Image (cartoon, rainbow, N blue to C red):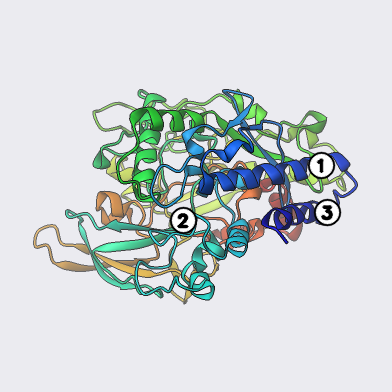
Amino acid sequence: MSSLTKRIGQWVCTLNSGGLHRNRAVVLATLFCAALLLAVELSGQQGPFDGLFSFIPNGTLYPNPLGASRTINVNGGGLDLANPFFQSLGTNGRACITCHQPSDGMAVSAAHVELRFLTSQGTDPIFRPVDGTVCDHGVDLTTVAGRADAYRLLRTRGLIRIAIPVPANADYRVVSVENPYGCNDTATIAAYRRPLPATNLRFLTAVMIDGRESTPLTGTQTIRYDNSPGSLLADLKQQAVDATVGHAQAAVPPSDDVVTRIANFELGLATAQVFDRRAGLLSAGGAQGGPQPLVSQPFFVSMNSSINPLFPQLEQPGGLVTPGDGQFTSDVFTIFQAWANLPPQDPRAAVARGEAIFDSKPIHITGVAGLNDPASQGGLAPGGVASLNGTCGTRHDTVNVGDHSYPTPLDIGTGDPDPANPSVNLGGLDIAYLPRVTVCKLDPASGAVTADCKTTSDLGQALIDGKFDHVGKVKGPVLRGLAARAPYFHNGSAATLLDVVRFYEKRFGWTLTPQEESDLVAFLGSL
């Protein structure tokens, strides 16, 4: 059976399992989509398509286990495959599309990575030892079995290995690294992270999980109210340079023209779920699902920020007071309000109930570094709020998007081992496959190691700025298009959206009934 046949079969089966086999139009769209996606993948190996395809129209459906998503280019009628985003610019066959696929919400799903391994026997461009293997040494890539083992975190969790040196001026010391794959260096730390979606980027307030492409510490710009969107464009351009030189192993950096075209292409993309296998079309009956409403969604940095009302005098470097709008509302999502009064048994009503839970169900927030600790907001704020009654919108406050409208890296415990059972995180999810890195704060006077220590699987922001108080802090993701890109959290610890919900239940003592869990999952899967 050819790779194309296998892929088409998988996507059609995905739809059939959801009861969509009676919808001939959707199945035909799926077949067309499968052929287009195969062409996109081939582009990373054969150059600019050899005349197969040059354009993916905006109307293309991308099936996933919960329904189908759509990615549109607001600056044109679709995805122009002549853009350098789709071209191999390095030496190892990779392009941006390698880790940012339309079928996966412009990121990658572990299920599709596994399929790519099976169909290529581990030779697809995503499988490269520079960052795809579990470690940069001690792996066997000469056999299929060896490659399957070496790339197992990429195959099963969708994780890329990011090696970052500990800053020379760090106010902490890495005292131990317990890495199950042998990358135990204490000077350069191996972090295992999910690729972020290359879509819905105009809502970003920091680029990369640890914000390393949005800080003067790396020669990039902090994204602020007074310099956006120019700062965002500049940061995305630098990220394209770094990804091409790093992940694609380019011998020379791409030109400014090339990275400008990539960044502008990314800024023009909008992605969201458009069809749910239970609720149907997500823009029906007055609902505002799908990517098109995102095109006109108002946004500015700190809009509806849940942080600025807590810290109204929060200042940026240079003394600029972040304006905010002073109008924070926890009613972050309004997409499915039109379905709120449908009969309770209607699947669309479940989505609307889930939206209401997201917006209004109280969560008692404690122990979150970046919000509850005295060093919140990098020391710019007068101090954290030890205990806060919030909602899901406290962390995901960008209206109808779910990102954080003000750059606010937090540590909610997704990478922190539970002291009672270190093989799981603070929300009870498996993290035994991740390293355990222990760091201790240094005495500022003597430089000696203190007893103030922390163990986590990813040092996060602290690997960029060297601050002990920032250990484990990472930025939250844009929530649109979740159904297309499982698993979840930056380390892939949540296999399903239900796992995400149950993490918050255990981590924060959040009490949901089975019906509320189901409704919230239905909502998240419809984004």
Badge 2 vs badge 3, beta-carbon distance below 8 Å: no
Badge 1 vs badge 3, beta-carbon distance below 8 Å: no
| N-term-proximal mark, 1 vs 3 | 3
> Could you say which is closer to the camera, residue 473 or residue 251?
251
> Could you say which is closer to the camera, residue 297 or residue 65?
65
Q: Please give left or right for residue 182 compared with residue 186 in the image.
A: right
Label 2 neighbour load within 10 Å: few <14, some 14-19, many 20+ = many
Q: Which residue lies furthest to the left in this view?
A: 446
- Residue 286 lies in quadrant: top right
Q: In this view, does 348 lie above or below 262?
A: below
Identify which amino acid the numbered label 1 is placed on. Leu
Q: What element carries label 2?
A: loop
Q: Nearer the viewer, mark 2 or mark 3?
A: 3
Identify which amino acid the numbered label 2 is placed on. Ile
Q: Quickly name the residue at label 2.
A: 412
The residue under the point 41% across, 52% down is 92
The residue under the point 24% across, 42% down is 217
Q: What element carries label 3?
A: helix
| N-term-proximal mark, 2 vs 1 | 1
Q: In this view, does 282 lie above or below 178?
A: above
- The image quadrant where one finds the C terminus is top right
Which numbered dot is residue 28?
Answer: 1
* Whole-number angstrom distance, CA of label 2 to CA of label 3: 37 Å
Badge 2 vs badge 1, beta-carbon distance below 8 Å: no
| N-term-proximal mark, 2 vs 3 | 3
Q: Position of residue 373 (x, y in %)?
A: 36, 52
> Could you say which is closer to the camera, residue 413 or residue 274?
274
